[in-house]
Amino acid sequence: MKIHCSKTALMEGINIVQTAVASKTTSSFLEGILVEAEETLKLTGFNLEIGIKSTVEADIIERGSLVLPSRLFSDIVRTLPDADIALTAAKNFEVQIDAEGSFFSIRGITAEGYPLLPQVDQGIQFVLPQNILKDMIKKTAFAVGLDQHRVILTGCLIESTGNELNMVAIDGYRVAWWKSFLEKGTVPMKVVIPGKSLSELQKILSSSDEPIRANMSKNYITFNTDKYMFLSRILEGEYLAYKSLIPTEFSTTVRFETARMLESVERACLVTGEDKKMQIHISVASDRMVITAHSDNGNYKDMISVEQEGNDIEIMFNPKFVQDALRAIQDEEKAKICFNSNVHPCVIKPDEGDSFFYMILPLRV
Amino acid sequence: MKIHCSKTALMEGINIVQTAVASKTTSSFLEGILVEAEETLKLTGFNLEIGIKSTVEADIIERGSLVLPSRLFSDIVRTLPDADIALTAAKNFEVQIDAEGSFFSIRGITAEGYPLLPQVDQGIQFVLPQNILKDMIKKTAFAVGLDQHRVILTGCLIESTGNELNMVAIDGYRVAWWKSFLEKGTVPMKVVIPGKSLSELQKILSSSDEPIRANMSKNYITFNTDKYMFLSRILEGEYLAYKSLIPTEFSTTVRFETARMLESVERACLVTGEDKKMQIHISVASDRMVITAHSDNGNYKDMISVEQEGNDIEIMFNPKFVQDALRAIQDEEKAKICFNSNVHPCVIKPDEGDSFFYMILPLRV
């Protein structure tokens, strides 16, 4: 194998696949990056949960393939001068990496033992702008369940009815729901993807509106751009009928400045700490919201001016759930929280638009 | 106790003392910040190794003192709005922290059990610009010894002969030596301060030439500015006669671009890893330096154009020592390395000036 490529292109390719390289296994294959020089140069990372294959612009002088230790390969390329790199592999998988007088040789292993990425046949396809998909994941994936007894809830549902696209995460106490009407619709489909996979995908998605193409078979889904193919397992099972969970009418609507409320809830979290049993108490009356929290650490009380519409309310929440929801919509200057009573679910959403909202179950006294 | 102060001033005061607060002890006192409101507001952190007392501009409405949990106090002040803060303590050490409608109360403990900082009598004094002291520490403290059987070498020597000021660290295999002629000299003195203390002091020193005043007694030294007093133990014992260790004549002098050589040695360290027994091999001939390294990870070779004066040389070093020295002088565009033979100590220093240099013992084959 012999290839020439630029340091920048190789580094980008390595960075993309590295999230999918396993870090603590007994397999040198899974801890390595598969380097394949055929018509183009392809790098692969695969930890059996997710797999990423990146395409690197390169001159292929002699074809071949092998597996290189991921960390060392990446560290070496990172420190090389910003120049053309020559990568040459000998029959014994000794690889020479050359750039402007600097010369490394490291030991690879045969590509023959590297696990094959599952083939995703041309099944259901849909195309989305990358920035939209990135936003969908950012606003929902944090709310997936962690309970391994309800595996289906550890994933996010992506559902399209044609022009209406939905992404939903539910963990039993809260729902995060992103929805949008796409001008250029997709085929109707429904798929549940592990939240962890989506969080990894989010990291490599660009913030531009360049398209990403999804391809689904029974057990796997791939997301494809010119630069990479991202593969994830699909979760099997029936997802919750989420639409019926969300109340649509409320007896109280409270509008507030998102940043002001977020900083207040973050302060309350200092007092409650990480303990899941902790609670914040919110009371709304006369256009004023009072947030209080108590724990062994101390007490907290804050008053926020709000616009109140409807009845007064006193209600308690897990502060982390409120904080997560507010962080997800913190780009919106104003938001609102809608209640029916202190035992019914409440909804937090931007003041304008219907593109995403959060439902949170209150805590009982 | 009742005080008013600005969030910014309080936060700055907390940040300064926090390095001296113990993090893992069984003592609530040592994990706390002592708050004393007398004529001024003073905060203290003291982990028995170093102690810091900061002065915060404040209106003292009612005097008093107590100890607050460091982490929680600091987190709370950090998240408060940028406004005036009121701090009010009740008799039971319950402290209320108020800022623009946000209201915390946390529990403190009595100041009576807080350990007293050792008194440093008006002994030897000297004054230095803060940026000079910061630079001295940065360029030497990394080279102190770690061997607890030679405690004196875990400290840096500060020695002044009047107008000549020296700071020295020696770990048995290398020497880092900063020296300067001060226009405004100090009294002749000699003191060894733990490297760890100096590294903490470095973090809070400013980069301006505002003065810092040192005050020494037999066992302790303090460094004083308008904003804080930093206290450290002094190490007892006789320091090495470092001046005689450093060769002054060399048979080979090699000049190079500091950044180019540093990046090459950093690459070599990727191959050698953290193993102390590893070595890099440097050979100089015909105005060319060749750096090589070998390990189970792989091999490395690099060629650098240099200006050579004197004999050719082949020599081996612990790569970390060379890397540390080059990092400390990386602000200098050009540097030089001077040899006598491959068994004699070599010296690395900036190409111009004599204000600091490093001596490293080579490894034997």
Image (tube, coloured by chain):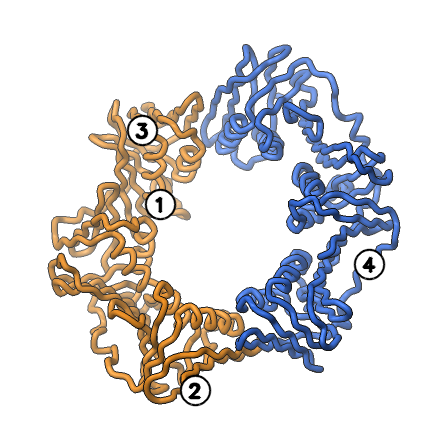
Chain colours: A orange, B blue
Residues under labels 4 and 1: Cα distance?
Answer: 54 Å
For discs 4 and 2, the disc positioned in front in the rendered view: 4
Q: Which residue is mark 1?
A: A21
- Tag 3: residue type? Cys
Name the chain letter of the residue that bears numbered label 1. Answer: A
First in residue order: circle 2 vs circle 1: 1
Q: Looking at the image, is A286 positioned above or below residue B193?
A: below
Which residue matches tag 4?
A: B118
Q: Could you tell me residue A29's position as x and y percent?
A: 34, 40
Q: Is residue B226 visible?
A: yes
| Residue at x-position 27% and y-position 49% | A208
Gap in angstroms between the C-alphas marked 2 and 1: 46 Å
Which image quadrant is residue A246 in?
Answer: bottom left
Who is closer to the viewer here, A238 or B137? Answer: B137
Residue A296 visible here: no
Q: Nearer the viewer, residue B199 or B245?
A: B199
Identify the element where label 2 is drawn. loop
Disc 3 crowd, CA 10 A, few/some/many (<14, 14-19, 20+)? some
